[in-house]
Amino acid sequence: MKKLFKWIALPVLFLSTTLAFKSAGPGDPESKQQLLTLIRMAISQAHTNNIAINDDFSRLVWQKYISFLDPNKQVFLKSDIEQLKKYETTIDDEINGAPISFYSACLAIYNKRLAEAEAGYIKNLQKPFDFSKSDKVLLEPDSIDFAGSPAALNQRWKDELKYRVLDNLLSLQAQRSASAAADPLRKKTDAELEKESREKVQKQFDRTFLRLKSNLADDKQFALFLNSITEIVDPHTTYMPPADKRAFDESMSRKFYGIGAGLKEEDGLIKVTSLEPGSPAWKSKMIDVNDIIFKVGQGSAPMEDITGMALSDAVKLIRGDKNTEVRLLMKKADGTEKTVIMIRDEIVQEDALARSAVINNNGKKIGYIYLSGFYADFKNANGAHCAADVAKELVNLKKENIEGLILDLRNNGGGSLQEVVKMLGLFIKNGPMVQVKGRTGNPQVLRDNDEAQLYAGPLVVMVNALSASASEIFAAAIQDYKRGIIMGSTSTYGKGTVQTTYGLNIPATATTPAKEFGAIKLTIQKFYRVNGGSTQLKGVVPDIILPDPYDFMKLREKDKVESLKWDQIAAVDFNYPPGVINEDGIIKMANDRLKKDPTFSKMTSDIDWFGKNNERRYDLSMANYKLRKDSLKIKSDELKNLQKLPKGQELQLSGLTASNTNTTANPVDEAKSTKFKEWIKGLSTDVYLKEATQVTADMMVK
């Protein structure tokens, strides 16, 4: 049985995300049981923790799958939950080979209740709401139980629909007040606007239920059930159906095979938002921004209607293998319909690759590199690899005679373990960079043994609450070696675990064909700093802490109940050259400056205010709700503006010399140049980058 799955990738570190379930594998009971067996074996044989699949585990899976199906407790009744309790301690038996029963029983009840909920929301939106009463609604599912009766569940729906209509109505009233005298909106009554609000909310829920019903397909639901098992193991152990495995590979390599059109979902329709220069869509001359895609076909196969489909699922249909044909039924701006046939080609996500600029600060040049992820094309040695790309940017920046460097890892969710070790070697001469340890054996120390140091000057690393995994390895090593200064929110994300992917495949026999069920992303190790501490849960605490709007949101690893615990192992010997930076002096100087800075002081105050006023409990009288909405908008706008430098105080940034070449003769290069300039313009108003620039300048003082 151990041969039922095979190792298919090198260890990878990344931030867990919610997956869409498309093209999952088995439909028959035998295949379902085979896939469940493969997942059980992978967990029991390779997970970093010794997982006991018993009644306690079963109870957690039972609860997780129900919460996946009904996260807001708006579908199931309390009596349904009581009926399903008989399966609470049997799921471990199913995982270990017993017939699969809970999944089918739960889904049967869910299908029935979903149809009732759909009929209920439509009925509740037929009549106007009365916003003169101070009705209350609590939209915190963790604070409420399942409804005890159909009437109570209907009231729950009615309260939420009233809240959504009220929110839309106030927005329309604000638009009416701001509209010109000749605008037809100006003449509309409150009753007319209330009716429009109900119609808008109905369209929103129509799309939601269309999506929910499309997700009732057996392959998608069984994938969801499997993930209720894997996520109990830990938040980053995940089952990936074949299409999701492809999407994961694309995200790691920063390339995919498709048509090169940016898309968005709007009112249940998939609209084109942009065209990648040089892509099949761009070359076709038949696709324009704002075109609507109704159907997608693979080669000569029948087209599939994507109206109401989740954007992520629509994208998976449009993408595919290189040199394969995809057909799109489009609706043009003039109302005509057109079928566009294209051959998929490689699309490199250039915006997601390492990018650099030069900050001109009082006659001194400071280099800036942005890295969105520690990407690696595992299938192609000549493909995109972040360490090599950062090295190229460093070489080019050194040609610009920079005297300091800012490396921006904000919102960087992680990536390849090998790449982060290689990248650390660009800044640190040599030595241990990180330790990794599985559930057995001694820790493995990953080292950089190359004494070459591509960049040895002043270094600031920017992080935030969404800097995770490989980003935390990098920041921790730079901090432990005193190689640079870390700046950012109170802590990074706190993901200190290593994942790899295993193919869940059954080979062909003389009488049966091969079965490919996708893959499981499995936590196989934890990583530790060279000082022995884990970043799990605690993350990396920056040397200089800046107020971060993410700080009041519960989105870090420590906020997930299934997360693995923090621990510590022995430190390894490492040395850092003395006198690299005047660390204590620079940090004190920055902190003194921040205490006196009115922008950051006000930002801290606003963030604290949001933390105290973040409960989703609402008074549904128009007067009271308007007061709350207005105060939230004032604070939100204020916080957003505080993060942008005022006019006249912008940073002076420019592209590297090679980036400033006149490319207007080539339309593709001209389009890329325009996107680069827009990126530079956005950076110039970044208040956090301004402070990082000042800290870097302080480090440059001899």
Image (cartoon, helix red, strand yellow):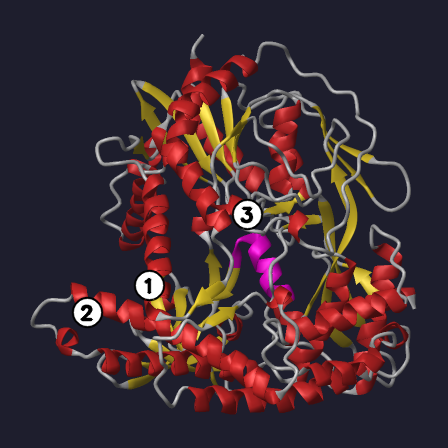
Q: Secondary structure at mark 2?
A: helix
* Rendering coords of residue 372 (x, y %): 51, 45
Residue type pointed to by label 3: Ala
Mark 2 or mark 3, whichever is nearer to me = 2
Residue 376 as seen in the image, left or right of residue 196: right
Residue toward you, 275 or 15: 15
In the drawing, what numbered circle is on residue 176? 2
Residue toward you, 130 or 449: 130
Residue toward you, 464 or 616: 616
* Rendering coords of residue 291 (x, y %): 31, 75
- Residue stretch in magenta: 245-255
Q: Is residue 572 visible?
A: yes
In the drawing, what numbered circle is on residue 267? none
**Which comes sooner in the sequence, label 1 or label 2?**
2
| Count of picture labels | 3
Q: Give the residue drawn at x 31%, y 54%.
A: 668
* Rendering coords of residue 479 (x, y %): 62, 26
- Mark 1 neighbour class, 10 Å CA radius: few under 14, some 14 to 19, many 20 or more: some
User: Gap between marks 1 and 2, in whole Å?
Assistant: 15 Å
